[in-house]
Amino acid sequence: MKIRISPLIIHLWVSSLDFYWIHHQNYELVDLLSHAIAVSRNMCTNGKTAAKERKKQELPRHAGSSAAMQRSPVDKLPFTLGDIKKAIPPHCFRPSVIKSFSYWSTTSPLPWASCTLLCHRRHHANTGSMENDEVYVAKKKSALPWYTPYVFGNPVGRLVYIVLQLTLAWPLYLGFNLSGQPYPRFTSHYDPYSPLFSDQERIQVLISDAGILAMLFTLYKLTAAFGFWWVVRVYGVPLLILNALFVLITYLHHTHWVLPHYDSSEWEWLRGSLSTVDRDYGILNHVLHNVTDTHVLHHLFPTMPHYHAMEATKAIRPILGEYYKLDPTSIIKATWREAKECMYVEPGNCNGIYWYNKKF
């Protein structure tokens, strides 16, 4: 008689310690990490329901494709964060412990979530800043390696880059701060004494590291009991899919030719927070609880429960006007286009404001 163990059950015991802290720090990231791993199951069991629900909740789209979009305005914002908040129904800010826990109980969060939350919080505090943002930091042309035009200037090179990015970028970012803000010394999300973290945060990194070690020991015991390829099938493949999905979503939210980037002379928190774009993932919008097409809202109000995000996004769009960006381009096409066109940033007509370019 074969014993079948769900990888979600494996996650459950090693991540329970982290959950309370993570859940009370950032609802949205918990929802993304928890449910991305369950994409295939949700698509199979809830596909028709999700399609109907999404049709009811679907936001108005820009006409046509990305070509119909215009660069985001960079004038002084005609509204404040308070104006945006007033447009949102108050109940959207109130989480339900029962509802939140019901989501988590079906797909528990990964044990390394807490160490990324600290930097995710710093990313939210510095989005769009050339000097201080933590992830997908836009590079100036002078900072690109010499081989960049040769790699990205042909389809084969771009394809290899995309594949490597989706498969290796996340673990390399965690381990070596790849694509993150440069620091004067070696930087790792697993090192509690990394310059990424403050003295108050080091204990949280150690707790997360303990969870990772517990998970590695569990995988070792499972490999000894059921074999290497069994662990690859039930754990490695789902983890690879999750990593790819996580990188893809975050990359496309922060990489687009219509989005400005600011240096210290022009950056303000609200301007930077609006330097992101919502995307349309079709049925996956619902499967991923709309983290994909409500990301602008997420940057403005990151602790808002995901189950109110659609309603809140509809409410703020009239206030944001042209400062809100949503690209309906298919995800495959958008990934290829962004890898081709968003090579580096250069100053525009206004000092301190940078835009993506691809010319060499």
Image: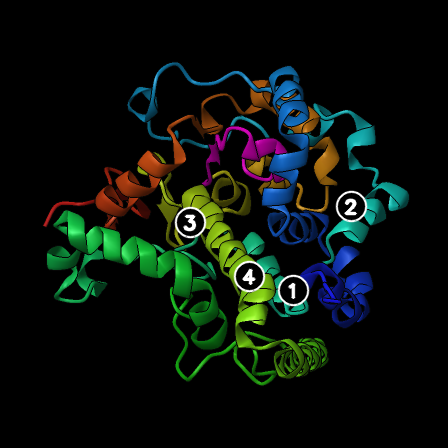
Residue toward you, 236 or 340: 236
Q: Which residue is mark 1?
A: 113
Residue type, mark 1 in image: Ala
Residue 230 in the image: state x and y as whole percent: 58, 69
Q: Is residue 210 left or right of residue 121?
A: right
Task: Tell which circle, 4 or 3, labels the residue nearer the N-terminal end.
Answer: 4
Indicate the quadrant where residue 18 lies: bottom right
Check whether the beta carbons of the residues at disc 2 and disc 3 lie within 8 A of each other: no
Is 177 included in the stretch rendered in magenta?
A: no
Residue 197 lies, in percent from the top left, at: 59, 75
Q: Tell me the crowding category of disc 3: few under 14, some 14 to 19, or many 20 or more residues within 10 angstroms, Cα based.
A: some
Q: Classify residue 204 as left or right of residue 184.
A: right
Q: In the rendered view, would you say 47 is above or below 216?
A: above
Q: Give the magenta range.
A: 275-292
Mark 4 and 1 residues: CB-CB less than 8 Å, in contact? no
Circle number at residue 316: none
- Residue 103, numbered label: 2
- Quadrant in which the N terminus is drawn: bottom right
Binning the other alpha carbons within 10 Å of mark 4 as few (below 14), some (14 to 19) or many (20 upward) gives: some
| Residue at image location 27% in from the left, 47% down from the top | 339
**Nearer the camera: disc 2 or disc 1:** 2
Identity of the amino acid at label 4?
Leu
Please name the predominant secondary structure of the magenta segment in the image: loop
> In the rendered structure, which disc, 2 or 3, sits on the residue that comes first in sequence?
2
Q: Is residue 206 visible?
A: no
Callout 2: SS: helix
Q: CA distance from mark 4 to mark 3?
A: 18 Å
- Residue lying at 72% horizontally and 64% vertically, measured from the top left: 5
Asked where in the image residue 84 lies, by quadrant, the reply is: top right
